[in-house]
Image (spheres, rainbow, N blue to C red):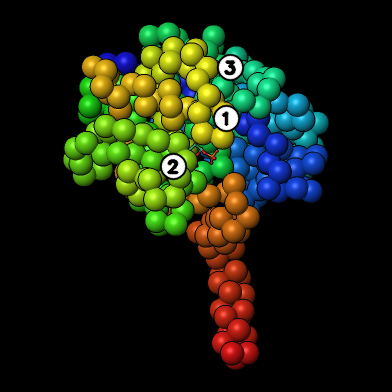
């Protein structure tokens, strides 16, 4: 059975929605509680068995490289002070030598183009994963791991995208699936469209930023087809696989997804992750209760 061991993390975006913060820090370094967005993505990939991590970056993303590097001065200082717990925390940010690669997307031509930039770092016969770090998913079993298991159940062939039902007024912001057979968590797909015009959506089952892709998708990207918004869309290259013997599947994951590409989603994730932390839960809950009492009194 073919194993998914490589993952691409497209992190080249300018993050303009978070200006001015993103003027000097990559969006992916912004923190939910005390861990950068990218750390959540990496932890999820590791849990799913990913061994090689490919970052598609752009100018100004150097902080990401530093983040995953050893920091001898900091480590020495913590060791000297006996701060073993913090040393353990730091270990989660280290990568084995050669396990992480950075490649630049020189022009912002779309998500499909970003993924295509990593083509030479992949095995042309193996499926690979793509993780969009903006989509943070809180789940008992990490989302990509759920997908890897479902993908193996299908015989480890074809392409699979994470999906969830979204409200009707939001669906045109996503890639959207046209379902052929609904098998519960897994669905087979007969159509897929990126950011459909309102009223033309085939369903409200949206693509969320986790993918397991057949290498044929990379070949499809070679065509450099211009799609929604004039960009080279990953959705289109996956849709080209529909009707082939490999096929395309959606996977309704179990878990809560936060859209950390939006300010409201980022704040919701911050509160939710704060409340799930033993060291913060009580104080934060107390504050939230106080806040709602004050608001109720004011109404
Ligand atoms: C991207 C994908 C889209 C997907 C979404 C999930 O869109 O192109 O198909 O539904 O991520 O977050 P973006 O959010 O970059 O516009």
Question: Which of the 4 image quadrants contains residue 4?
Answer: top left
- Screen quadrant of the N terminus: top left
Determine whether 54 is above or below 219 in the image.
below
Question: Which of the 4 image quadrants contains residue 296?
Answer: bottom right
Nearer to us of marks 1 and 3 is 1
- Residue linked to disc 3: 117
Residue depicted at 25% across the width and 22% down the height: 243
Q: Position of residue 227 (x, y in %)?
A: 50, 28
Q: Position of residue 137 (x, y in %)?
A: 46, 46
Q: Which mark is residue 213?
A: none
Gap between marks 1 and 3, in whole Å? 18 Å
Instruction: Count the marks.
Output: 3
Left or right? Give the position of 277 relative to 61: left
Left or right? Give the position of 104 relative to 118: right
Q: Nearer the viewer, residue 245 or 75?
A: 245
Q: Which mark is residue 230?
A: 1
For label 3, count other residues whose C-alpha is less than 10 Å away and answer few (under 14), some (14-19) or many (20+). Answer: many
- Among numbered discs 1 and 2, the one appearing first in the sequence: 2
Nearer to us of marks 3 and 2 is 2
Q: Which mark is residue 196?
A: 2
Question: Helix or strand or loop: what does disc 1 sit on?
Answer: helix
- Screen quadrant of the C terminus: bottom right
Gap between marks 1 and 2, in whole Å? 14 Å
């Amino acid at each position: 059975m073919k194993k998914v061991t490589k993952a691409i993390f497209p992190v080249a975006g300018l993050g303009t929605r978070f200006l001015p913060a993103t003027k000097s820090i990559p969006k992916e370094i912004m923190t939910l509680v005390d861990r950068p967005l990218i750390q959540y993505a990496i932890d999820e990939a590791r849990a799913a068995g990913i061994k090689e991590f490919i970052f598609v970056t752009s100018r100004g993303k150097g902080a990401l490289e530093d983040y995953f590097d050893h920091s001898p001065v900091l480590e020495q200082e913590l060791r000297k002070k006996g701060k073993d717990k913090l040393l353990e925390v730091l270990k989660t940010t280290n990568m084995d030598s050669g396990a992480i690669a950075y490649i630049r997307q020189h022009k912002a031509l779309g998500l499909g183009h970003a993924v295509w930039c990593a083509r030479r770092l992949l095995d042309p016969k193996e499926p690979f994963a793509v993780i969009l770090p903006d989509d943070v998913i809180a789940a008992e079993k990490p989302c990509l791991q759920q997908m890897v298991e479902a993908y193996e159940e299908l015989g480890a062939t074809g392409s699979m995208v994470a999906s969830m039902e979204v409200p009707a007024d939001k669906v045109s912001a996503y890639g959207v699936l046209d379902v052929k057979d609904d098998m519960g968590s897994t669905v087979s797909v007969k159509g897929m469209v990126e950011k459909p015009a309102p009223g033309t959506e085939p369903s409200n089952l949206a693509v969320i930023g986790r993918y397991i892709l057949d290498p044929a998708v990379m070949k499809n990207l070679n065509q450099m087809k211009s799609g929604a918004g004039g960009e080279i869309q990953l959705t289109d290259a996956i849709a080209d696989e529909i009707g082939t013997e490999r096929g395309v599947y959606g996977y309704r994951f179990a878990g809560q997804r936060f859209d950390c590409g939006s300010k409201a989603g980022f704040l919701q994730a911050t509160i939710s992750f704060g409340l799930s932390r033993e060291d913060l839960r009580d104080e934060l809950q107390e504050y939230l209760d106080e806040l709602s009492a004050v608001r109720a009194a004011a109404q």
